[in-house]
Image (spheres, rainbow, N blue to C red):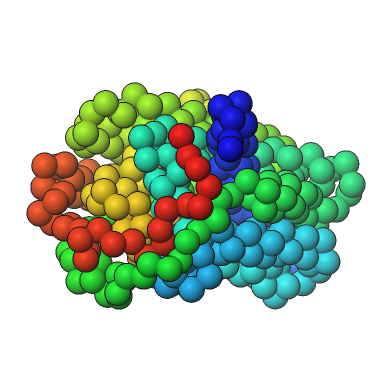
Protein backbone atom coordinates (compact mmCIF):
# COMPACT_ATOMS: atom_id res chain seq x y z
CA UNK A 1 0.00 0.00 0.00
CA UNK A 2 1.35 3.42 -0.97
CA UNK A 3 1.72 5.90 1.92
CA UNK A 4 0.77 9.57 1.68
CA UNK A 5 4.43 10.59 1.85
CA UNK A 6 5.39 8.18 -0.93
CA UNK A 7 2.49 9.43 -3.02
CA UNK A 8 3.56 13.07 -2.56
CA UNK A 9 7.18 12.25 -3.36
CA UNK A 10 6.03 10.40 -6.47
CA UNK A 11 4.02 13.42 -7.59
CA UNK A 12 6.94 15.78 -7.03
CA UNK A 13 9.20 13.40 -8.98
CA UNK A 14 6.68 13.32 -11.84
CA UNK A 15 6.49 17.13 -11.84
CA UNK A 16 10.30 17.27 -11.98
CA UNK A 17 10.20 14.84 -14.91
CA UNK A 18 7.72 17.07 -16.75
CA UNK A 19 10.03 20.06 -16.20
CA UNK A 20 13.21 18.29 -17.33
CA UNK A 21 11.59 16.87 -20.44
CA UNK A 22 10.38 20.34 -21.43
CA UNK A 23 13.86 21.74 -20.82
CA UNK A 24 15.34 19.46 -23.49
CA UNK A 25 13.07 20.33 -26.40
CA UNK A 26 14.57 23.64 -27.63
CA UNK A 27 18.33 23.97 -26.93
CA UNK A 28 19.17 22.09 -30.13
CA UNK A 29 17.54 24.96 -32.08
CA UNK A 30 18.42 28.03 -30.00
CA UNK A 31 22.08 27.05 -29.65
CA UNK A 32 22.55 27.46 -33.42
CA UNK A 33 21.95 31.21 -33.79
CA UNK A 34 24.73 32.52 -31.51
CA UNK A 35 27.24 30.19 -33.20
CA UNK A 36 25.95 30.72 -36.74
CA UNK A 37 29.07 32.51 -37.98
CA UNK A 38 31.41 29.76 -36.82
CA UNK A 39 29.15 27.01 -38.17
CA UNK A 40 28.96 28.71 -41.57
CA UNK A 41 32.73 29.21 -41.71
CA UNK A 42 33.40 25.55 -40.88
CA UNK A 43 30.67 23.86 -42.90
CA UNK A 44 30.22 26.34 -45.81
CA UNK A 45 26.45 26.34 -45.27
CA UNK A 46 24.69 29.25 -46.97
CA UNK A 47 22.13 31.38 -45.18
CA UNK A 48 19.31 29.29 -46.61
CA UNK A 49 21.28 26.15 -45.76
CA UNK A 50 21.44 27.33 -42.16
CA UNK A 51 17.68 27.79 -42.31
CA UNK A 52 17.38 24.04 -42.90
CA UNK A 53 18.61 23.48 -39.34
CA UNK A 54 15.30 24.97 -38.19
CA UNK A 55 13.06 24.07 -41.13
CA UNK A 56 13.72 20.31 -41.12
CA UNK A 57 13.06 19.80 -37.36
CA UNK A 58 9.88 21.85 -37.65
CA UNK A 59 8.70 19.76 -40.62
CA UNK A 60 9.38 16.60 -38.64
CA UNK A 61 7.59 17.99 -35.58
CA UNK A 62 4.61 18.47 -37.84
CA UNK A 63 4.58 15.28 -39.92
CA UNK A 64 5.40 12.91 -37.05
CA UNK A 65 2.72 14.45 -34.82
CA UNK A 66 0.05 13.04 -37.15
CA UNK A 67 1.24 9.57 -36.18
CA UNK A 68 1.13 10.39 -32.46
CA UNK A 69 -2.23 8.75 -31.68
CA UNK A 70 -1.31 5.59 -33.61
CA UNK A 71 2.11 5.48 -31.94
CA UNK A 72 0.56 5.68 -28.49
CA UNK A 73 -1.87 2.93 -29.37
CA UNK A 74 0.94 0.72 -30.72
CA UNK A 75 3.66 1.04 -28.06
CA UNK A 76 2.15 3.13 -25.26
CA UNK A 77 2.92 6.69 -24.23
CA UNK A 78 5.67 5.79 -21.76
CA UNK A 79 7.71 3.71 -24.20
CA UNK A 80 7.24 6.31 -26.94
CA UNK A 81 8.50 9.06 -24.60
CA UNK A 82 11.59 7.17 -23.43
CA UNK A 83 12.50 6.12 -26.97
CA UNK A 84 12.10 9.69 -28.23
CA UNK A 85 14.31 11.09 -25.45
CA UNK A 86 17.02 8.56 -26.36
CA UNK A 87 16.84 9.74 -29.98
CA UNK A 88 17.22 13.37 -28.84
CA UNK A 89 20.25 12.46 -26.72
CA UNK A 90 21.90 10.58 -29.60
CA UNK A 91 21.26 13.30 -32.18
CA UNK A 92 22.67 16.07 -30.00
CA UNK A 93 25.75 14.00 -29.06
CA UNK A 94 26.39 13.37 -32.77
CA UNK A 95 26.95 17.09 -33.25
CA UNK A 96 30.34 16.65 -31.61
CA UNK A 97 31.40 14.97 -34.88
CA UNK A 98 29.55 17.35 -37.20
CA UNK A 99 32.29 18.69 -39.46
CA UNK A 100 30.20 19.16 -42.60
CA UNK A 101 26.98 20.92 -43.48
CA UNK A 102 25.15 17.74 -44.46
CA UNK A 103 25.98 16.10 -41.12
CA UNK A 104 24.64 19.13 -39.27
CA UNK A 105 21.40 18.80 -41.23
CA UNK A 106 21.27 15.07 -40.38
CA UNK A 107 21.63 15.81 -36.66
CA UNK A 108 18.86 18.41 -36.90
CA UNK A 109 16.61 15.77 -38.47
CA UNK A 110 17.44 13.16 -35.81
CA UNK A 111 16.78 15.48 -32.89
CA UNK A 112 13.71 16.91 -34.60
CA UNK A 113 12.29 13.40 -34.91
CA UNK A 114 12.70 12.78 -31.17
CA UNK A 115 11.24 16.15 -30.23
CA UNK A 116 8.31 15.52 -32.57
CA UNK A 117 7.34 12.32 -30.76
CA UNK A 118 7.66 13.97 -27.32
CA UNK A 119 5.48 16.92 -28.34
CA UNK A 120 2.87 14.63 -29.87
CA UNK A 121 2.58 12.34 -26.84
CA UNK A 122 3.31 14.51 -23.80
CA UNK A 123 0.24 16.81 -23.58
CA UNK A 124 -2.04 13.78 -23.32
CA UNK A 125 0.10 12.40 -20.49
CA UNK A 126 -0.10 15.73 -18.66
CA UNK A 127 -3.89 15.86 -18.95
CA UNK A 128 -4.15 12.23 -17.82
CA UNK A 129 -1.86 12.56 -14.82
CA UNK A 130 -2.95 16.05 -13.71
CA UNK A 131 -6.64 16.24 -14.69
CA UNK A 132 -7.42 19.03 -12.19
CA UNK A 133 -4.27 21.07 -12.87
CA UNK A 134 -3.95 20.99 -16.66
CA UNK A 135 -3.39 24.76 -17.00
CA UNK A 136 -0.57 25.11 -14.44
CA UNK A 137 1.12 21.89 -15.58
CA UNK A 138 0.98 22.85 -19.25
CA UNK A 139 2.33 26.23 -18.14
CA UNK A 140 5.22 24.49 -16.39
CA UNK A 141 5.90 22.32 -19.43
CA UNK A 142 5.79 25.33 -21.76
CA UNK A 143 7.91 27.44 -19.40
CA UNK A 144 10.66 24.85 -19.13
CA UNK A 145 10.50 24.36 -22.89
CA UNK A 146 11.12 28.09 -23.36
CA UNK A 147 13.66 28.09 -20.52
CA UNK A 148 15.55 25.38 -22.36
CA UNK A 149 15.66 27.76 -25.29
CA UNK A 150 17.32 30.36 -23.06
CA UNK A 151 19.76 27.75 -21.81
CA UNK A 152 20.74 26.87 -25.36
CA UNK A 153 21.34 30.49 -26.33
CA UNK A 154 23.51 31.28 -23.29
CA UNK A 155 25.41 28.05 -22.69
CA UNK A 156 26.38 27.17 -26.26
CA UNK A 157 28.60 30.25 -26.88
CA UNK A 158 30.09 29.93 -23.38
CA UNK A 159 31.06 26.28 -23.91
CA UNK A 160 32.25 27.00 -27.46
CA UNK A 161 34.47 29.84 -26.18
CA UNK A 162 35.85 27.73 -23.32
CA UNK A 163 36.64 24.72 -25.52
CA UNK A 164 37.42 26.50 -28.78
CA UNK A 165 34.86 24.32 -30.58
CA UNK A 166 31.38 25.26 -31.71
CA UNK A 167 30.64 21.52 -32.08
CA UNK A 168 31.21 20.96 -28.37
CA UNK A 169 29.06 24.00 -27.64
CA UNK A 170 26.20 22.26 -29.46
CA UNK A 171 26.84 18.70 -28.24
CA UNK A 172 26.99 19.53 -24.52
CA UNK A 173 23.18 19.44 -24.37
CA UNK A 174 23.29 15.65 -24.68
CA UNK A 175 23.93 15.60 -20.90
CA UNK A 176 20.58 17.06 -19.79
CA UNK A 177 18.90 14.89 -22.43
CA UNK A 178 20.47 11.82 -20.83
CA UNK A 179 19.21 12.99 -17.43
CA UNK A 180 15.70 13.26 -18.88
CA UNK A 181 15.92 9.68 -20.16
CA UNK A 182 16.84 8.47 -16.67
CA UNK A 183 14.10 10.44 -14.94
CA UNK A 184 11.45 9.39 -17.47
CA UNK A 185 12.43 5.75 -17.08
CA UNK A 186 12.12 6.02 -13.32
CA UNK A 187 8.96 8.08 -12.88
CA UNK A 188 6.73 8.14 -15.99
CA UNK A 189 3.75 5.86 -15.28
CA UNK A 190 2.98 2.92 -17.51
CA UNK A 191 -0.04 2.53 -19.80
CA UNK A 192 -2.85 0.03 -20.06
CA UNK A 193 -3.32 -0.36 -23.81
CA UNK A 194 -6.07 -2.96 -23.65
CA UNK A 195 -8.72 -0.47 -24.71
CA UNK A 196 -8.49 0.84 -28.21
CA UNK A 197 -10.22 3.50 -30.26
CA UNK A 198 -11.00 3.59 -33.91
CA UNK A 199 -9.37 5.93 -36.37
CA UNK A 200 -9.25 8.97 -34.10
CA UNK A 201 -6.93 10.80 -36.49
CA UNK A 202 -9.32 10.47 -39.43
CA UNK A 203 -12.28 11.58 -37.34
CA UNK A 204 -10.54 14.64 -35.88
CA UNK A 205 -9.16 15.67 -39.28
CA UNK A 206 -12.71 15.70 -40.64
CA UNK A 207 -13.59 18.53 -38.25
CA UNK A 208 -12.94 22.16 -39.28
CA UNK A 209 -11.96 23.14 -35.72
CA UNK A 210 -8.89 20.88 -35.91
CA UNK A 211 -7.70 22.79 -38.97
CA UNK A 212 -8.41 26.15 -37.34
CA UNK A 213 -6.27 25.15 -34.37
CA UNK A 214 -3.52 24.01 -36.74
CA UNK A 215 -3.54 27.32 -38.56
CA UNK A 216 -3.36 29.46 -35.44
CA UNK A 217 -0.68 27.29 -33.85
CA UNK A 218 1.39 27.27 -37.04
CA UNK A 219 1.23 31.01 -37.68
CA UNK A 220 2.28 31.81 -34.10
CA UNK A 221 5.08 29.24 -33.98
CA UNK A 222 6.32 30.39 -37.36
CA UNK A 223 7.23 33.59 -35.55
CA UNK A 224 9.09 31.57 -32.94
CA UNK A 225 11.03 29.55 -35.53
CA UNK A 226 12.11 32.73 -37.33
CA UNK A 227 13.12 34.51 -34.13
CA UNK A 228 15.27 31.68 -32.77
CA UNK A 229 16.90 31.25 -36.18
CA UNK A 230 17.54 34.88 -37.11
CA UNK A 231 17.35 37.21 -34.10
CA UNK A 232 21.00 36.65 -33.15
CA UNK A 233 22.30 36.82 -36.76
CA UNK A 234 20.21 39.96 -37.36
CA UNK A 235 21.96 41.80 -34.55
CA UNK A 236 25.33 40.35 -35.53
CA UNK A 237 24.86 42.32 -38.75
CA UNK A 238 24.83 45.43 -36.52
CA UNK A 239 28.21 44.39 -35.12
CA UNK A 240 27.10 42.37 -32.09
CA UNK A 241 29.28 39.41 -31.08
CA UNK A 242 28.17 35.81 -30.50
CA UNK A 243 27.84 36.19 -26.72
CA UNK A 244 25.95 39.49 -26.89
CA UNK A 245 23.51 38.28 -29.53
CA UNK A 246 23.14 35.01 -27.65
CA UNK A 247 22.26 36.99 -24.52
CA UNK A 248 19.57 38.82 -26.48
CA UNK A 249 18.08 35.48 -27.54
CA UNK A 250 18.36 34.23 -23.97
CA UNK A 251 16.46 37.25 -22.65
CA UNK A 252 13.73 36.56 -25.18
CA UNK A 253 13.58 32.90 -24.10
CA UNK A 254 13.47 33.79 -20.40
CA UNK A 255 10.61 36.16 -21.10
CA UNK A 256 8.87 33.36 -22.99
CA UNK A 257 9.32 31.01 -20.06
CA UNK A 258 8.00 33.56 -17.56
CA UNK A 259 4.74 34.17 -19.41
CA UNK A 260 4.33 30.53 -20.40
CA UNK A 261 4.33 29.73 -16.68
CA UNK A 262 2.38 32.67 -15.29
CA UNK A 263 -0.36 33.32 -17.86
CA UNK A 264 -1.92 29.83 -17.62
CA UNK A 265 -2.03 30.25 -13.83
CA UNK A 266 -3.67 33.67 -14.15
CA UNK A 267 -6.12 32.33 -16.73
CA UNK A 268 -6.94 29.07 -14.92
CA UNK A 269 -10.22 30.32 -13.43
CA UNK A 270 -11.41 31.86 -16.70
CA UNK A 271 -12.80 29.28 -19.16
CA UNK A 272 -12.62 31.87 -21.95
CA UNK A 273 -8.93 32.15 -22.86
CA UNK A 274 -9.44 34.66 -25.67
CA UNK A 275 -8.68 37.89 -23.77
CA UNK A 276 -5.37 36.40 -22.64
CA UNK A 277 -4.57 35.22 -26.17
CA UNK A 278 -5.26 38.70 -27.55
CA UNK A 279 -2.91 40.16 -24.95
CA UNK A 280 -0.10 37.86 -26.08
CA UNK A 281 -0.77 38.62 -29.74
CA UNK A 282 -0.63 42.37 -29.03
CA UNK A 283 2.79 41.90 -27.43
CA UNK A 284 3.98 39.97 -30.47
CA UNK A 285 2.75 42.76 -32.74
CA UNK A 286 4.72 45.35 -30.76
CA UNK A 287 7.83 43.16 -30.83
CA UNK A 288 7.80 42.44 -34.56
CA UNK A 289 6.98 46.05 -35.43
CA UNK A 290 9.91 47.19 -33.28
CA UNK A 291 12.30 44.74 -34.97
CA UNK A 292 11.14 45.90 -38.39
CA UNK A 293 11.15 49.68 -37.84
CA UNK A 294 13.33 50.44 -34.79
CA UNK A 295 15.68 47.50 -34.17
CA UNK A 296 18.40 49.66 -32.60
CA UNK A 297 16.02 51.24 -30.07
CA UNK A 298 15.96 49.24 -26.82
CA UNK A 299 16.61 45.80 -28.37
CA UNK A 300 16.48 44.02 -24.99
CA UNK A 301 13.08 45.59 -24.27
CA UNK A 302 11.84 44.42 -27.66
CA UNK A 303 13.13 40.92 -26.88
CA UNK A 304 11.27 40.88 -23.56
CA UNK A 305 7.98 42.03 -25.12
CA UNK A 306 8.21 39.67 -28.09
CA UNK A 307 9.27 36.75 -25.91
CA UNK A 308 6.37 37.37 -23.52
CA UNK A 309 3.93 37.30 -26.42
CA UNK A 310 5.35 34.16 -28.01
CA UNK A 311 5.67 32.20 -24.78
CA UNK A 312 2.28 33.08 -23.37
CA UNK A 313 0.53 32.40 -26.67
CA UNK A 314 2.18 28.98 -27.05
CA UNK A 315 1.08 27.82 -23.60
CA UNK A 316 -2.45 29.20 -23.90
CA UNK A 317 -3.18 27.72 -27.31
CA UNK A 318 -1.96 24.32 -26.08
CA UNK A 319 -4.47 24.63 -23.22
CA UNK A 320 -7.23 25.73 -25.62
CA UNK A 321 -6.71 22.53 -27.64
CA UNK A 322 -6.92 20.38 -24.50
CA UNK A 323 -10.01 22.30 -23.35
CA UNK A 324 -11.96 21.16 -26.41
CA UNK A 325 -12.35 17.53 -25.26
CA UNK A 326 -12.78 16.17 -21.71
CA UNK A 327 -11.25 12.75 -22.43
CA UNK A 328 -7.46 12.94 -21.91
CA UNK A 329 -6.55 10.59 -24.77
CA UNK A 330 -8.81 12.36 -27.25
CA UNK A 331 -7.64 15.79 -26.09
CA UNK A 332 -4.04 14.59 -26.44
CA UNK A 333 -4.78 13.35 -29.96
CA UNK A 334 -6.27 16.73 -30.88
CA UNK A 335 -3.21 18.49 -29.44
CA UNK A 336 -0.93 16.19 -31.44
CA UNK A 337 -2.75 16.94 -34.67
CA UNK A 338 -2.77 20.68 -33.95
CA UNK A 339 0.99 20.52 -33.50
CA UNK A 340 1.30 18.33 -36.58
CA UNK A 341 -0.24 20.74 -39.04
CA UNK A 342 1.01 23.70 -37.04
CA UNK A 343 4.67 22.77 -37.09
CA UNK A 344 4.56 21.95 -40.80
CA UNK A 345 3.24 25.47 -41.34
CA UNK A 346 5.77 26.88 -38.86
CA UNK A 347 8.68 25.27 -40.69
CA UNK A 348 8.42 27.59 -43.69
CA UNK A 349 8.88 31.10 -42.18
CA UNK A 350 12.49 30.63 -41.06
CA UNK A 351 13.42 29.79 -44.65
CA UNK A 352 11.15 32.58 -45.95
CA UNK A 353 12.88 35.16 -43.74
CA UNK A 354 16.24 33.98 -45.13
CA UNK A 355 14.93 34.29 -48.70
CA UNK A 356 13.52 37.77 -47.99
CA UNK A 357 16.89 38.74 -46.49
CA UNK A 358 18.67 37.61 -49.66
CA UNK A 359 16.18 39.58 -51.76
CA UNK A 360 16.12 42.79 -49.72
CA UNK A 361 19.45 42.79 -47.91
CA UNK A 362 17.88 42.89 -44.44
CA UNK A 363 15.50 41.21 -42.02
CA UNK A 364 12.80 43.92 -41.87
CA UNK A 365 10.63 42.32 -44.58
CA UNK A 366 10.62 39.05 -42.65
CA UNK A 367 9.56 40.72 -39.41
CA UNK A 368 6.75 42.54 -41.26
CA UNK A 369 5.56 39.19 -42.61
CA UNK A 370 5.18 37.94 -39.05
CA UNK A 371 3.38 41.12 -38.02
CA UNK A 372 0.78 40.30 -40.70
CA UNK A 373 0.50 36.73 -39.41
CA UNK A 374 -0.12 37.95 -35.86
CA UNK A 375 -2.90 40.22 -37.13
CA UNK A 376 -4.54 37.29 -38.92
CA UNK A 377 -4.42 35.05 -35.83
CA UNK A 378 -5.96 37.82 -33.70
CA UNK A 379 -8.97 37.70 -36.00
CA UNK A 380 -9.22 33.89 -35.92
CA UNK A 381 -9.04 33.67 -32.12
CA UNK A 382 -12.55 35.16 -31.83
CA UNK A 383 -13.88 31.71 -32.72
CA UNK A 384 -12.44 30.05 -29.60
CA UNK A 385 -15.52 30.62 -27.45
CA UNK A 386 -15.62 27.81 -24.84
CA UNK A 387 -19.40 27.57 -24.98
CA UNK A 388 -19.12 26.14 -28.49
CA UNK A 389 -16.48 23.47 -27.85
CA UNK A 390 -18.94 20.57 -27.39
CA UNK A 391 -20.70 21.51 -30.62
CA UNK A 392 -17.65 21.85 -32.86
CA UNK A 393 -15.65 19.04 -31.23
CA UNK A 394 -17.94 16.31 -29.81
CA UNK A 395 -16.30 13.35 -28.09
CA UNK A 396 -15.42 10.34 -30.25
CA UNK A 397 -16.98 6.99 -29.40
CA UNK A 398 -18.49 8.14 -26.13
CA UNK A 399 -15.13 8.95 -24.60
CA UNK A 400 -13.50 5.52 -25.00
CA UNK A 401 -9.78 6.15 -24.83
CA UNK A 402 -7.12 4.31 -26.79
CA UNK A 403 -4.61 4.93 -23.99
CA UNK A 404 -6.33 4.19 -20.74
CA UNK A 405 -5.49 5.57 -17.34
CA UNK A 406 -2.07 4.96 -15.93
CA UNK A 407 -1.46 1.82 -13.94
CA UNK A 408 -0.01 3.65 -10.95
CA UNK A 409 -2.23 5.40 -8.37
CA UNK A 410 -2.64 9.12 -8.69
CA UNK A 411 -3.79 11.78 -6.32
Q: Is residue 315 left or right of residue 164?
A: left
Q: Residue 399: which quarter of the image?
A: bottom left
The x and y percentages for residue 396 are 22, 64
Q: Residue at x 61, y 26 (%)?
A: 5
x%, y% of residue 242? Answer: 71, 42
Residue sitting farthest toward the front: 1
Residue found 23% across the figure and 71% down from its top: 203
Whether residue 152 is visible here, answered yes or no, is: yes
For the N terminus, the quadrant is top right
| Residue 63, placed above or below residue 255 | below
Q: Where is residue 300 in the image (x, y as percent from the top left)?
A: 53, 28
Would residue 348 be visible to someone looking at this image?
Answer: no
> Residue 401: where, in percent of width, then height?
33, 61
Quick check: 202 left or right of 359? left
**What residue occupies the far right of the structure in this picture?**
163
The quadrant where residue 70 appears:
bottom left
Q: Which of 361 and 277 is in front in this view?
A: 277
Residue placed most toward the observer, 332 or 151: 332
Horizontally, is 333 left or right of 57 in the view? Answer: left
Amino acid sequence: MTTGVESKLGRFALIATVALIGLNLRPFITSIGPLAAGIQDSTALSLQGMALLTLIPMLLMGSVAFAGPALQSLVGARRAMIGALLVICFGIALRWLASTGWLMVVTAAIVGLGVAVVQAVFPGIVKREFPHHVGPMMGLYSATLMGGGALGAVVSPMVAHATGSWAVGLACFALPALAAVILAGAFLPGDDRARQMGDITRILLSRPRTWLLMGCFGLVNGGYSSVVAWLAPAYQEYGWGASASGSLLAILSISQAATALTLPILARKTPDRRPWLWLTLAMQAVGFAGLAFMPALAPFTLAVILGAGLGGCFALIMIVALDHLPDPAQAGALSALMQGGGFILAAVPAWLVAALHDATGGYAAGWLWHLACVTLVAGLVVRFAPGGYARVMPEVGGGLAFVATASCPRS
